[in-house]
Image: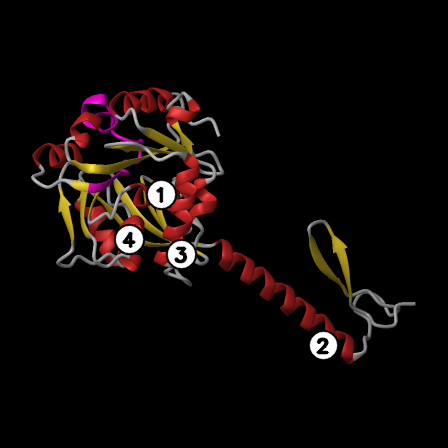
């Protein structure tokens, strides 16, 4: 005999309420059983809504530039900059709950460039995106002079409107072609980060041997260049080869998901991997970073040691 009337029974991936009782399908039921059933129904509906909220993507910005469609999408705790479509791979990401967090691993890897450069003062960023790297630098090194070059004014608009990017006396954004900026630049830099992407990948002219040679002429003595390669597939080894042909003193490291390869070149001698780990440990302690650069540095491959510019680790 069914004493309580409504029962929650398992049926496939969901639950259903079984109203059957000893008095028939809609027979008389204790009032308490109806209240209990309603409670569980509302509970499951509420949990389902929470799950939907966590999965729901909200488009905050959507504008087409002369180059492509630029979107800012919120999903849960994360905000993404995307090119092309709302479900395309993201170009930049921040945590809405913790703006000081660095969710993109390749940004953390690229910070090794600051360890390699002796007392850096001037930084150049080719490709702004959501400004994750520049924002990280400005939080921890407010005395740096930073120039960022971005060809697409709509990307700059999105970065300023939704990613907290703000220009000031020490941080300037130039809406210009990256290759042309390098060619015409009157300044030289201690660290140059190459991270220019479109929805179709990195432009060919920004991964050529000629471009890397032009970059080298804008590096101070002991300066460092870091190049982020994301999902380059068969192009990756050719790009790494062109990079190494210009920067004989080089190193590389991969993200743990194998999607990004970050190449480092140095004007001058590249420290050994052991020296980099020690220097990264001191750098992390002095800068107050939220992640351990020494742990990251343990994975780096320095080309003279590895015998190849292509990062195998």
Tell which circle, 3 or 4, labels the residue nearer the N-terminal end.
Answer: 4
Secondary structure at badge 1 equals helix
- The reply to whether callout 1 and callout 2 are in contact (CB within 8 Å) is no
Question: Looking at the image, do the residues carrying marks 4 and 2 touch, with CB atoms under 8 Å apart?
Answer: no
Residue at 39% in and 60% down: 96
* Tag of residue 137: 4
Mark 4 vs mark 2, CA separation in Å: 57 Å
Q: Which residue is mark 3?
A: 285
Task: Residue 251: tell me if it is visible.
Answer: yes
Residue 78 position within the rendered picture, expressed as x and y whole percent measured from the top left: 42, 55
Screen quadrant of the N terminus: bottom right
* Local crowd size for mark 3, using a 10 Å CA cut-off: few (<14), some (14–19), many (≥20): few
Q: Nearer the viewer, mark 1 or mark 2?
A: 1
* Secondary structure of the residue carrying numbered label 3: helix
Foreground residue among 155 and 238: 238
Q: Position of residue 103 (x, y in %)?
A: 42, 51
* Residue under pointer 2: 35
Mark 1 — residue? 112
Q: Secondary structure at mark 2?
A: helix
Residue 228 in the image: above or below residue 122 = above
201 lies left or right of 186: right
């Amino acid at each position: 005999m069914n004493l309580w009337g409504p029962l929650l029974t398992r049926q496939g991936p969901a639950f259903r309420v079984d109203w059957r009782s000893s008095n028939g399908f809609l027979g008389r039921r204790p009032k308490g059983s109806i209240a209990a059933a309603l409670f569980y129904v509302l509970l499951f509906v509420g949990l389902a809504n929470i799950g939907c909220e966590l999965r729901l993507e909200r488009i905050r910005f959507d504008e087409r530039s002369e180059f492509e469609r630029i979107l800012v999408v919120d999903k849960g705790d994360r905000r993404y900059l995307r090119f092309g479509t709302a479900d395309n791979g993201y170009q930049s990401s921040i945590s809405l709950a913790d703006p000081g967090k660095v969710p993109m691993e390749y940004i953390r890897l690229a910070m090794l460039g600051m360890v390699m450069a002796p007392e850096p003062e001037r930084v150049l960023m080719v490709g702004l995106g959501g400004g994750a790297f520049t924002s990280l630098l400005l939080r921890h090194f407010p005395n740096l002079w930073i120039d960022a070059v971005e060809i697409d004014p709509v990307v700059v608009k999105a970065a300023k409107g939704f990613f907290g990017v703000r220009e000031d006396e020490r941080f300037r954004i130039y809406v210009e072609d990256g290759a042309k900026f390098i060619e015409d630049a009157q300044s030289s830099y201690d660290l140059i980060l190459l991270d220019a992407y479109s929805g179709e990948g990195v432009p060919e002219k920004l991964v050529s041997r000629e471009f890397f040679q032009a970059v080298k002429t804008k590096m101070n003595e002991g300066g460092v260049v870091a190049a982020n390669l994301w999902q380059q597939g068969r192009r990756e080894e050719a790009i790494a080869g062109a990079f190494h042909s210009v920067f004989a003193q080089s190193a590389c490291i991969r993200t743990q998901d194998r999607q990004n390869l970050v190449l480092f070149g140095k004007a001058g001698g590249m420290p050994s991997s052991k020296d980099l780990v020690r220097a990264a440990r001191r750098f992390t302690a002095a800068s107050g970073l939220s992640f351990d650069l020494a742990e990251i540095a343990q994975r780096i491959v320095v080309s003279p040691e590895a015998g190849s510019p292509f990062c195998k680790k």
